[in-house]
Amino acid sequence: MAAEPLLNQLIEALRCLPGVGPKSAQRMALHLLERNREGGLRLASVLVEAMQKIGRCKQCRDLTELEVCSICASPRRDQSLLCIVESPVDVLAIEQATAYKGRYFVLLGRLSPLDGIGPAELGLDQLAEQLEQNTLEEMIIATNPTVEGEATSYYLQSMAKAQNIKVTCIAHGVPLGGELEYTDQSTLAHAFGRRLLVD
């Protein structure tokens, strides 16, 4: 039996999700239609509402329904600390795994001239305005350890140093519980190059 046009549209729509190929999309669509129509309707409703109402925080550029996100609006957050991350998922990871209580700035990418991503696309003019307010004591750079991430980190460091703001970078290297013999060469070289003084 040939698939109906609407079923094809549903399968194709599900393929927009990361890591979802044709077979996975087909399984999801058939599962919703055969076993969980109520869940499918709820998913559709919440998805429409989320796409219409979730935008960017005007201060940190993280995802939020409000003009200013709950982190930026919280009086309990340390206004002297600013952590720079590449994407909203990085904010979630840091919030879930650490006791960090400062603020964030979300770049929504990293410098990549070949892809046409420069300082303007990352909102670095907005970041520069925040740095000029002289309320920051430390900028924590938490970009990914890629070539573009490192280039972005160097650019951010120069911005902070121009305002006499202390700059720190998150450590990269051998994972906790990892073994040296199984660690790739570039990770091990990076960890060795940035070794810490033990008190």
Image (spheres, grey):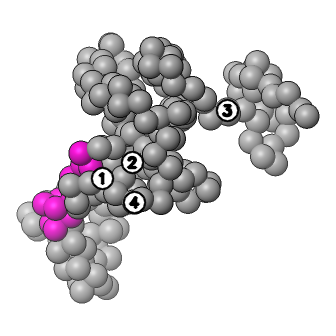
- Helix, strand or loop at label 1? It is strand
Q: Can residue 44 be seen in this view?
A: no
Who comes first in sequence, dot 3 or dot 4? 4
- Residue 88 is marked as 2
- Helix, strand or loop at label 3? It is loop
Q: Where is residue 1 in the image (x, y as percent from the top left)?
A: 17, 71
Q: Would residue 118 appear left or right of 47 to someone viewing this image?
A: right
Disc 3 target residue: 172
Please report contact status of discs 3 and 4: CB closer than 8 Å, yes or no.
no
Magenta-drawn stretch contains 63: no
Q: Which amino acid does label 3 sit on?
A: His
Point out the stretch of residues depicted in magenta: 48-58
Query: Could you tell me which residue is drawn at 34 percent across and 67 percent down?
Result: 27
Q: How crowded is mark 4: few (under 14 residues within 10 Å), some or many (20 or more)?
A: few
CA gap, disc 4 and disc 1: 16 Å
Who comes first in sequence, dot 2 or dot 4? 4
- Residue 63 is marked as 1
Mark nearer the viewer, 4 or 1: 4
Q: Would residue 41 appear left or right of 39 to someone viewing this image?
A: left
Q: Would residue 68 appear left or right of 96 to someone viewing this image?
A: left
Query: Could you tell me which residue is drawn at 72 percent across and 32 percent down?
Result: 173
Who comes first in sequence, dot 4 or dot 1? 1
Q: Where is residue 163 in the image (x, y as percent from the top left)?
A: 44, 19
Q: Which of 41 and 61 is in front in this view?
A: 61
- The relative height of residue 43 versus residue 19 in the rendered view (above or below) is below
Who comes first in sequence, dot 3 or dot 1? 1
- Residue 74 is marked as 4
